[in-house]
Amino acid sequence: MIGSFRLPVSLTSGDTTAPTITTATVEDANPDKLVVVFSEVVDITDITGLTITGDATPTLSAPTGGGSSTITFTLSTALINGQLVTLNVASSNTIKDAANNSLEAATKSITNNVAVTYEAETTSYMNTIAIADDANPSIYTGVSNNQVWVKVNDFISTLKTNSILTKCFRVYPKLGDTAIKQGIDMTTPTRSGTYGGSWVFNNKGAVANGSNTYFDSNVIPSSLALNSKDDFAITQQISAIDTALSSVNPQGFGALADGNSDLRIAMYVAISRDINKGYYSMGRPFSSVGVTTVSNAIHTLSRDSLDTAFYYNNGVEKFTDSVSNSTLGSLSIYEGGRNADTGLGDQVAANIGVSAYHKHLTASEISILHTAINTLEVALNRI
């Protein structure tokens, strides 16, 4: 052999694969910590190029875990249950692997495992009407049991945040599918109203037949008021008016009588066969007036301490009037039936949803209450 030579051998040029994000998670135990797991060991200099967008936009800080495949960031504000958020990585980020490959620009949905923190009223009410906090389907179309909990909690939280719940004497959400469940008062679940007549109880609420159905709310205004002329109001959802059955005029939304027509303090939405007409009364009757929309409407009838009555349709004031200088009624208010001197005479043919008995509220509070009731009804596919 005159000579020999060795062919060159290709040596590996090293790792050229950029690291990727495997998971990004916020856990219930630490709702202010974002834990990001990468495809390999990485290091980080600072939080440049990292942002969070979506239902919440907390800033990131204090990354820990450099030199491993898991880095934890502190969020400026903790996430709450249900918020949908995304981690956005710009090309300017400083995350690199051991071979100095930078994390490429990307977006990653953050898994939000933060559980709901329920209001005490939510837990008490939902347990009383025996709806479990689980993922099983509820009686409401396309809504799970735990979603019902969340929607009820949102409703209660809205009223509490805006100092409206403390002004409510009773709130009847009318959830569940039995007379007992739908009669439970949300503010104090040991109290309830009583259904009479041939109601139908289903996922639309309590359905009145226009003949003999009424709900005795067990709310007696005179026992709640601080004086004989104190403020009192009702806000109630009425939907799916059955005009074929609505032959009696007026048809009661909620009413009370004090045994004498001169002292009667009636409080009801009167629905004629023409659902665009009706009249309202509290103290002295209002004159006949037009109604914007009765079907799928939230009505508020209110008497304030200045002996003025107000009517709101879907949170918008329609008119006011003076009322007689009489004491508030000493009989229960009946929903779905007009409590005339001679007893229950006129009934409504409709689905009656959430009803709240409360003090006279400001225009802004009426709007908030209307929105909260409507949001709950829509979320449960009841209207």
Image: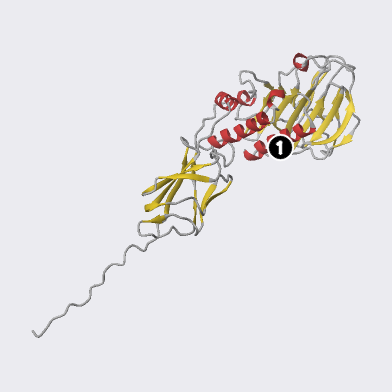
Which amino acid, mark 1? Thr
Q: Residue furthest left?
A: 1
Q: Residues within 10 Å of mark 1 (few under 14, many from 20)?
A: some
| Image: 107 above or below 136 | below
Please give the count of numbered marks on the rendered protein. Answer: 1
Q: Nearer the viewer, residue 372 or 45?
A: 45
Residue behind mark 1: 371
Q: Position of residue 378 (x, y in %)?
A: 66, 40
Q: Say above or below: 187 vs 222.
A: below
At a point 28% along the width and 67% down the height, the residue shown is: 12
The reply to whether residue 173 is visible in this rendering is no
Residue 156 located left or right of residue 134: right
User: Residue 85, image x and y in percent?
Assistant: 54, 47
Q: Residue at x 85, y 26 (%)?
A: 309
With 205 as the anchor, is 287 left or right in this view? right
Front in this rendered view, residue 21 or 7: 7
Is residue 79 left or right of 358 when viewed as pictured?
left
Give x and y (percent) for residue 240.
72, 38
Residue 152 appears in the figure: yes
Q: Nearer the viewer, residue 113 or 220?
A: 113
Quadrant assignment, res 149: top right
Query: Can you name the residue that lies furthest to the bottom here?
Result: 2
Q: Residue at x 44, y 52 (%)?
A: 45
Outermost residue to the front: 45
Q: Nearer the viewer, residue 80 or 294?
A: 80
> Circle 1 — which element?
helix
Of the 4 image quadrants, the one containing the N terminus is: bottom left
